[in-house]
Structures are given as structure tokens and as C-alpha cells.
Amino acid sequence: MRKTLFPAALAAAMTIAGGAFASSEAIETGTVLGKNADAIREALVDKGFEVRKIDTEDDELEAYAVRGEHRYEIYVSTETGAVTKVKADD
């Protein structure tokens, strides 16, 4: 019985961990979110983020967002709508 139960439990744990890892990689440089604050907010919410604030700095929009226990600063080009930098607080 144990020989059957352990592999099944291990497979389930790996699936759960793999899903969490994949979602943490959803935002990276080059990901297109949108060219304005509303589009960026909608895209981030769709990806599971809670958007706290979006500011304009130079020619970029800077989104402050939270997912789980992690906070992110996500910089997006207003010209291309693509992410230029992601800073995560550990």
C-alpha cells in the first residue's frame, strides 16, 4: 500500500509546486501588458496580481503589484506596451 501511495503523493506535490512556479514566471521582460494604465491593470489582474498603484515615470508606466506574499514593481514602455524591467521584493 505504501509503495502505491508515496508515488501518487509525490506526483501531486510536484504538480502543485510546478503550477506555483509557472505562475511566478508569468511576468518577465518582453511580456506585453498594454500601453496605458487601464490595460496594464487589467492584464495584471488577469494574471493573478493585485495592483496597488500605477505611476508614470519618464516614458514608462510603473505598476506596483502584489501576488501572494510577494510585491513587484513592473516597468512597462508606453511606446510598446512591453515590460522593460521587473523588481520583486523577497
Image (cartoon, rainbow, N blue to C red):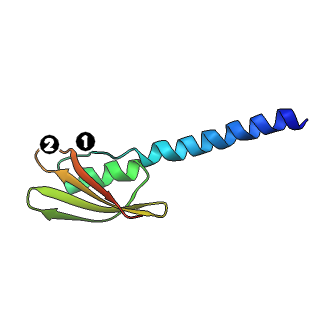
Q: Which mark is residue 66?
A: none
Q: Are marks 1 and 2 in contact (CB under 8 Å)?
A: yes
Q: CA distance from mark 1 to mark 2?
A: 8 Å
Q: Please give the residue where the numbered disc 1 appears in the rendered image.
A: 32
Crowd rating for badge 1 (residues with CA inside 10 Å; few <14, some 14–19, many 20+): some
Q: Residue at image x 44%, y 52%?
A: 48
Q: In the structure shown, which secondary structural element does the residue marked by tag 1 occupy?
A: loop
Q: Return the residue nearer the eye: 66 or 37.
A: 66
Q: Residue at image x 79%, y 39%?
A: 6
Residue 63: name its quadrant.
bottom left
Total numbered circles: 2
Counting from the top left corner in percent of width and height, residue 70 is at 43, 62
Q: What amino acid is found at the position of numbered circle 1 in the picture?
A: Val
Q: What amino acid is found at the position of numbered circle 2 in the picture?
A: Thr
Q: In the structure shown, which secondary structural element does the residue marked by tag 2 occupy?
A: loop
Counting from the top left corner in percent of width and height, residue 59 is at 9, 56
Q: Return the residue nearer the eye: 14 or 53.
A: 14
For the N terminus, the image quarter is top right
Q: Which mark is residue 80?
A: 2
